[in-house]
Amino acid sequence: MTASPAVPAPVPTAPGGLPLIGHAHHLVRSPLPFISSLRDHGSVVRIRLGPTPAYVVTDPVLTRTVLVTEAAHFAKGGKIFDVLRGVFGDGLATIGDGDTHLRNRRLMQPMFNKAHIATRRTAMIEQSRSMVGAWEKGQLRDVFADMNDVTLAAFLVALFGADLPAHLQREFTTLMPALMKGAIRQTVLPPWVTRLPLPANRAQARGIARLRVLMDQAIDHTPSAPDPAEAAGCPHQAAAGDEQAVLFETLKAAEDQFTREQLQDEAITLMNAAIETTATALAWTLYELTRHPEIEERLRAELAAVCAGRPLREEDLDRLPYARQVLQEGVRKYGPAWMVTRTATRDIELGGHRIPRGADVVWSPYLHQNDPAHFPDPAAFDPDRWADGRLPSTRDSFFAFGDGRRKCIGENFAWVEMQIILATLLETWPRLRLVSRPPRAETAITVKPDRLAMAFS
């Protein structure tokens, strides 16, 4: 006698949905408490974005199934990517699965291997040092805005060279946060609202058009070579010029493989990743240092032992393991992403539940990385949870850069950039002080601080 096949269990529906808008009001008003609350209702929970159902995966084991084991049946897609595609175009983060994605990733992968990133470290250190060192002692600083500026500048000097026109950096810094805010608004609202000729929708369209104009100017910019007479007396300057020339040639080679629009798409996608994830993680990490002077003291001791009183050099970065742990804990605690989607390509069972073909499947790094079952006392800022020899479940539930074949191509770059900026800031300023109230978490594409003012002296 053969056993009858198990019948998939119905997917539980989250409470609090409303007619027409579903759970959108929760996602707009209290997104983090709402997404965290779904853990109490099951490993897969049904919500509605307007009239459209979506299935939220609250178990990290099942999320790894979606991203790795059964990735072929959960395609990159869903409403959030449809919206982001309007900003980024078909960059690596938003393009659909298939041959084009694999081809583009292979073409861009050499730019992001560790050896190639190492050639950009010195230029990034110098750029970061000049910006952080220009702050006025004791001045009240908007830290999130500052981290956006510094991370963007470090990215631009790595990708386009050291003498990109200043107006491009200023406009990129202004445009990207506004576009990301507009994108998340369009994600959680019913589609018909985003198609109306409302002022916010028109502003979003104008911003996207301007972004592409600016990116074209950056792509066409040619880094200037160092003055031969000055370079002869300064080998380091000559090396910086060589780095810029190699990078520029790399981009031109990519342009031979991509159309101009595809090259725009990839550059915009990379720039957003450089700002959103790294700036957010750095801002939260600096806030945590003001709350934990013992962690700051340990960081400074590590930096002093490695640098021995001289300025930071690119070869020092690999000898700052505690700085990496601190940054990893900042990324862990605050997300950075809080809602990512895939699309089921067929009817499929996930965790004993039936997911219909075409459904949006939602996973959340923020949810998983604040799960007490995998990160004991998740509200605590504990860099030592990343020390060697700690429980592997900690790492198995860390999804900040995704996983599987769509894992973020720029992860190595992001860690290097964050280490450079954190070390440079500590090297430049002996004292950090919070001068605003403790920040509240706010959701855009990432989980960012609503207000964070600090003084450096």
Image: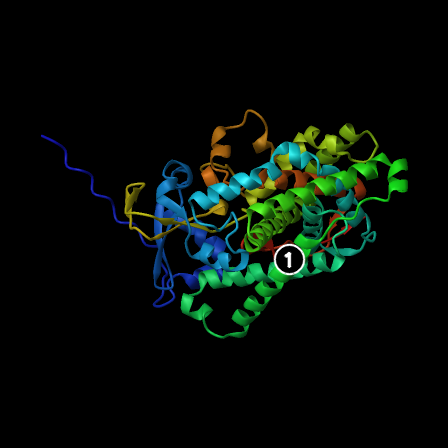
Q: What amino acid type is highlighted by mark number 1?
A: Asp
> Which element type, helix, strand or loop, lies under badge 1?
helix
For the N terminus, give its image quadrant: top left
Residue 321: name its quadrant: top right
- Is residue 174 left or right of 457 when viewed as pictured? left
Question: In the rendered view, does 59 fall on the left or right side of 285?
Answer: left
Left or right? Give the position of 229 relative to 294.
right
Whether 121 is drawn above or below 89: the answer is above
Asked whether the viewer can see residue 372, the reply is: no
The quarter of the picture where residue 427 lies is: top right
Q: Toward which corner of the image does residue 124 lie, by quadrant? A: top right
**Location of residue 224 in the rendering, given as x and y in whole percent from the top left corner:** 78, 48
242 and 236: which is toward the camera = 242
Which residue appears at 62% of the width and 34% of the height?
325
Q: Is residue 193 above or below residue 229?
A: below
Q: Position of residue 142 (x, y in %)?
A: 71, 56
Residue 38 is at least partly visible in this image: yes
Point 38% across, 64% down: residue: 50
The percent coordinates of residue 151 (x first, y second) are 68, 48
